């Protein structure tokens, strides 16, 4: 190393030390392996995401099993002898919840020539804030003509799918400060073989990967005021991070409420997220979604339905309960010095400014297993500008086209144990945790550059920490 590079290296280390002193103090280091508190489970194989909360009663475990059956088993075309699970489609993306949330975990990008299943495209068109005010308040977006808010690439035999979604990747090389290189996948999306007319020229699209299901009930149990207390939309503390809440429409109460689920925090509850997926992903109606994403011009009403609604309130309750009761696996290797060093580095780089390590749940009526739990999800559930490289350009409620909700990190080290093909980030483009880190921009750019400038052993320590979660 020549003198100038030597000076730059030590200046960077000194600045990193200053950053560490700023960021490390407010953010705690996890001191327990029980990331989900009393509900944490000791399961580390391909079933790591599929267990009920460890502190759940036997009676509720029976409800969990019933919900699991409706989550896992395929829905079929109506009429059918399987009356409880008929009414699929006619336009859809998959025929079961498990088809996207593989083993209750992440989805994956399609292999070359493979039809995407756990990755799909959200659709909309630009809206007029005045003329479309009521629509934006209730739906968050203005649907694309005919094609609606989601591209359905599958259909019943008597119908044609809306179109094919095609994704191809090119490689982009990123050079780290020590000279090593990492290749990133840059996705390019196309819509081909349209069956219901042309698409508008101003179409907005957003690729979405199925996220993991673990710990959702615990996230729902975090008091709203605690989430709002972490918001800093004007960056008044000057740390470069300005998380802000999304406000979305609650279809159950016909009111605006804090959004905390979905890639852009556009869903207010597990129930609404689940029943929205039934409508959009499988073409199934429910009490919250009496209509699916099918346009009248697509004539979906020409086929028999599976009931009115097709997902009964009882089934909806079982599936919602199941989704709210999936446990978080325990952390591993917490005593490993490398993991401990990585945890300190995570805080020092400022990663914890968005991936808030610790929360306390409040009281959930009828759900003591979710109440008063100290949890370590590593999220603030707020929106952050992630930069141009990750931008989809598609607003949703209060979220801009550059903003995404901070995804929880608990369990992330087991993602590819549960599904070996699992991808990271909102569209699965990152094949490894390191690639995911290097895609960060916007408010996370400083943390990303800090990672790029670290010596190799310190980068490895940070990755080992993430793998331990």
Image (tube, rainbow, N blue to C red):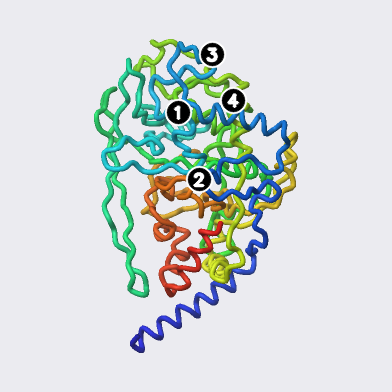
Callout 3: few (<14), some (14-19), or many (20+) C-alpha neighbours within 10 Å?
few
Reading the image, the residue beneath label 3 is: 308
Label 1 to label 2, Cα distance in Å? 28 Å
Q: CA distance from mark 3 to mark 1?
A: 17 Å
Mark 1 / mark 2, whichever is N-terminal: 2
Task: List x then y, in percent, for residue 226.
Answer: 67, 50
The residue tagged 1 is: 280
Q: Residues within 10 Å of mark 2 (few under 14, many from 20)?
A: some
Rendered residue at 48%/46% (across/down): 418
Q: Earlier in the sequence, mark 4 or mark 1?
A: 1
Q: Quadrant of residue 250?
A: top right
Looking at the rendered image, the disc whose residue lies closer to the viewer, 4 or 3, is 4
Instruction: Find the distance from the CA under tag 4 to the CA under tag 2.
Output: 26 Å
Which quadrant holds the C terminus? bottom right
Please state the total of marks drawn on the protein image: 4
Q: Position of residue 175 (x, y in %)?
A: 32, 68
Q: Marks 4/1: CA distance?
A: 15 Å
Q: To which residue does mark 2 refer? A: 46
Asked if the residue at tag 2 contacts the one at tag 1, i.e. Cβ–Cβ closer than 8 Å, the answer is no
Q: Decide: few, some or many residues near mark 4? Use Cα within 10 Å; few <14, some 14-19, many ≥20.
A: many
Pointer 4 residue: 316
Taking the image as shown, residue 114 lies to the left or right of residue 134, namely left
Does the image show residue 126?
no
Q: Which mark is in front, 4 or 2?
A: 2
**Residue ID at (71%, 39%):** 56
Q: Residue at x 60, y 47 (%)?
A: 328
Q: Secondary structure at mark 4?
A: helix
Q: Secondary structure at mark 2?
A: loop
Badge 3 or badge 1: first in the primary sequence: 1
User: From what the image shows, is residue 446 above or below residue 263?
Assistant: below
Name the N-terminal-most of marks 4 and 3. Answer: 3
């Amino acid at each position: 190393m020549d003198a100038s590079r030597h000076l730059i290296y030590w200046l960077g280390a000194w600045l990193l030390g200053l950053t560490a002193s700023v960021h490390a103090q407010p953010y705690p280091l996890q001191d327990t392996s029980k990331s989900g508190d009393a509900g944490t489970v000791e399961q580390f194989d391909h079933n790591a995401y599929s267990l009920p909360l460890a502190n759940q009663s036997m009676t509720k475990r029976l409800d969990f099993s019933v919900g699991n059956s409706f989550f896992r088993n395929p829905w079929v075309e109506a009429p059918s002898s399987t009356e409880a699970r008929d009414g699929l489609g006619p336009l859809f993306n998959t025929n079961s919840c498990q088809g996207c949330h593989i083993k209750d975990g992440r989805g994956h990008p399609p292999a070359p020539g493979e039809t995407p299943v756990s990755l799909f495209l959200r659709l909309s068109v630009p809206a007029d804030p005045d003329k479309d005010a009521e629509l934006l308040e209730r739906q968050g977006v203005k649907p694309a003509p005919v094609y609606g808010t989601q591209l359905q690439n599958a259909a019943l035999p008597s119908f044609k799918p809306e179109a094919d979604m095609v994704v191809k990747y090119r490689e982009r090389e990123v050079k780290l400060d020590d000279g090593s290189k990492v290749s990133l996948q840059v996705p390019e999306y196309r819509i081909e073989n349209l069956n219901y007319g042309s698409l508008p020229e101003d179409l907005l699209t957003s690729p979405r990967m199925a996220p993991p299901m673990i710990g959702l009930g615990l996230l729902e149990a975090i008091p709203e005021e605690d989430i709002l207390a972490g918001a800093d939309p004007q960056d008044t503390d000057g740390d470069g991070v300005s998380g802000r809440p999304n406000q979305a429409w609650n279809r159950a109460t016909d009111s605006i409420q804090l959004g905390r689920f979905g890639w852009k925090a556009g869903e207010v509850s597990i129930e609404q997220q689940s029943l929205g997926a039934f409508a959009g992903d499988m073409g199934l109606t429910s009490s919250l979604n009496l209509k699916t994403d099918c346009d009248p011009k697509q004539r979906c009403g020409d086929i028999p339905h599976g009931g009115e609604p097709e997902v009964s309130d009882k089934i909806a309750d079982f599936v919602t309960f199941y989704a709210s009761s999936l446990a978080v696996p325990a952390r591993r290797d917490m005593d490993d010095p490398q993991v401990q060093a990585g945890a300190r580095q995570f805080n020092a780089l400022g990663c914890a400014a968005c991936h808030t390590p610790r929360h306390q749940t409040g009281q959930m009526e009828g759900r003591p297993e979710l109440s008063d739990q100290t949890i370590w999800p590593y999220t603030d559930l707020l929106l952050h500008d992630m930069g141009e490289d990750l931008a989809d350009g598609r607003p949703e409620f209060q979220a801009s086209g550059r903003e995404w909700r901070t995804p929880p990190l608990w369990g992330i080290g087991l993602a590819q144990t549960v599904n070996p093909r699992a991808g990271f980030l909102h569209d699965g483009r990152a094949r490894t945790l390191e690639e995911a880190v290097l895609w960060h921009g916007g408010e996370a750019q400083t943390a990303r550059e800090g990672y790029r400038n670290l010596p190799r052993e310190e980068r490895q320590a940070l990755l080992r920490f993430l793998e331990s979660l």
